[in-house]
Image (cartoon, rainbow, N blue to C red):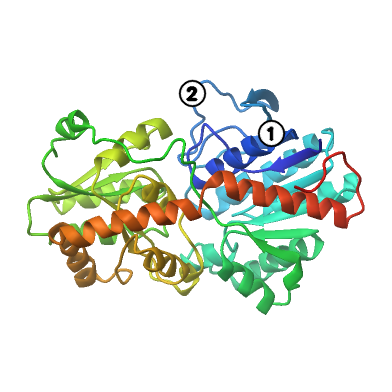
Amino acid sequence: IINILFLTDNFPPEVNAPASRTYEHCCEWVKSGNNVTVVTCTPNFPDGVVHPGYKNKLVSLEKIDGINVVRVWSFIASNRGFSKRILDYISFAITAVIFGRKIDADIIIATSPQFFTALSGKILSKLKRIPWIMEIRDLWPESIVSVGAIKNKLVYRFLTKLEYSCYDSASKIITVTHSFKTILVRNGVPQEKISVICNGVNTSLFHKRRKDFMLLKNLGIDGKFVVSYIGTIGMSHAIDFIVRSAKKIKNDKIVILIIGSGAEKDNVRNQIKKEKVKNVILLDTLPKIEIVKYLASIDVALINLKKSPLFKTVIPSKIFENAAMEKPILLGVDGEARNMIEKYNAGIYFSPENEDDFLNKIQKLYRDTKFYKACQIGCRNLTRAYRREDLAKNMLKQIYKTMHENNLKFKNQIP
């Protein structure tokens, strides 16, 4: 049995991708007999509002499915605006170190996308004299530069310097895409230090289900062909482009359903109202169990990001959940994500922020039933290759290996 200390900004009941990945991995590690403690903040993503049943205390403890959860105070800010978000990130990094020092651990894992959490891992590793693993879910600060959130070159250079100090300090680096690994190696990070553990899907929760026709009827879209975006409505997601394009869909059988919250949600709502877009429905974020019902009831999963070279390196985690529900992917993300979709024939790619291509690909999915069914088969094949349980076990092997490489003794043998 080993004691794993995991540092993360996001954790259930938050429902974003980092929270889901961390929770599902930790569940598997607990099942393997290990002791897992997660240090996180009070759940508030993405609106900066504390979730019902929680208070932003200095520290609070709970147990979730065998995982020890330590929630520490942080300055809470909504997922918008650079300065307040930085205060949010830094405050959590500080309290994570303060309370993390008191937790018995054999190894530390700290996850991005923001690397102030990684700095906490680096500091705790030195204080406790134990190895730490840096999990890279996003190249930060590069990703926020790509959407215009950082324009000051001095700030960018400073943050980049901190970023690479974490890479140097970590005993192991785990990236969620092969593109991230390629970039790090190109920039001087030793290749042997990096392993790739992609995102995946919990197939016990996400699998093919019957449509909820009452749900569709209540939304007034029963009998419609529903193309749905479910996720964060942020600066990087170009949802304004989707709304603008939707207005030009002439087929009244096709509707766009958008579910989520984020920095751009108010702007999107105002855009729908101002431009009188009748075929777009905008709903608030829902609990994960409710999201499953909506995923079961839609026809096509829309996954979209702004046109940026950096986003060619990412694989949105929504791909895996939608594929498991056998919903063909309408993908507006080039690069590694596109390669995955085309490899498994799990959907169709459109050029990011290209209106004509977007509209043509929607029509293809709507009219070509043979192609649509082929995509559903492709979704099944993709899902088999990216089961979260298998990926969590692979990451646990990397944890064991890292401990062995640091000459630490523990009871378990490498599987």
Residue at disc 1, secondary structure: helix
Q: Is residue 182 left or right of residue 359?
A: right
The residue lying at 17 percent from left, 64 percent from top is 364
Q: Is residue 246 left or right of residue 156?
A: left
CB-based contact (under 8 Å), mark 2 and mark 1? no
Q: In the rendered image of this protein, does residue 298 appear above or below residue 346?
A: above
The residue lying at 27 percent from left, 59 percent from top is 374
Residue at disc 2, secondary structure: loop
Q: Is residue 293 left or right of residue 63?
A: left
In front of the other: 146 or 154: 146
Q: Residue 69: image x %, image y %?
A: 67, 30
The amino acid at mark 2 is Pro
Q: In the rendered image of this protein, does residue 231 appear above or below residue 332?
A: above
Q: How many marks?
A: 2
The residue lying at 35 percent from left, 58 percent from top is 378
In front of the other: 149 or 36: 36
Splitting the image into 4 quarters, where does residue 188 fall?
A: bottom right
Give me the disc on residue 183: none
Q: Is residue 399 left or right of residue 410?
A: left
Q: Nearer the viewer, mark 2 or mark 1?
A: 1
Q: Residue 266: image x %, image y %?
A: 32, 46
Q: In the rendered image of this protein, does residue 127 appear above or below residue 358?
A: above
Q: CA distance from mark 2 to mark 1?
A: 27 Å
Rendered-image quadrant of the N terminus: top right
Q: Alpha-carbon neighbours of circle 1 within 10 Å: few (<14), some, or many (≥20)? A: some
Q: Residue 285: image x %, image y %?
A: 37, 37
**Residue 363 visible:** yes
Give me the disc on residue 52: 2
**Residue 122 visible:** no
Q: Which residue is mark 1?
A: 30
Instruction: Indicate which disc, 2 or 1, sits on the residue closer to the N terminus.
Output: 1
The amino acid at mark 1 is Val
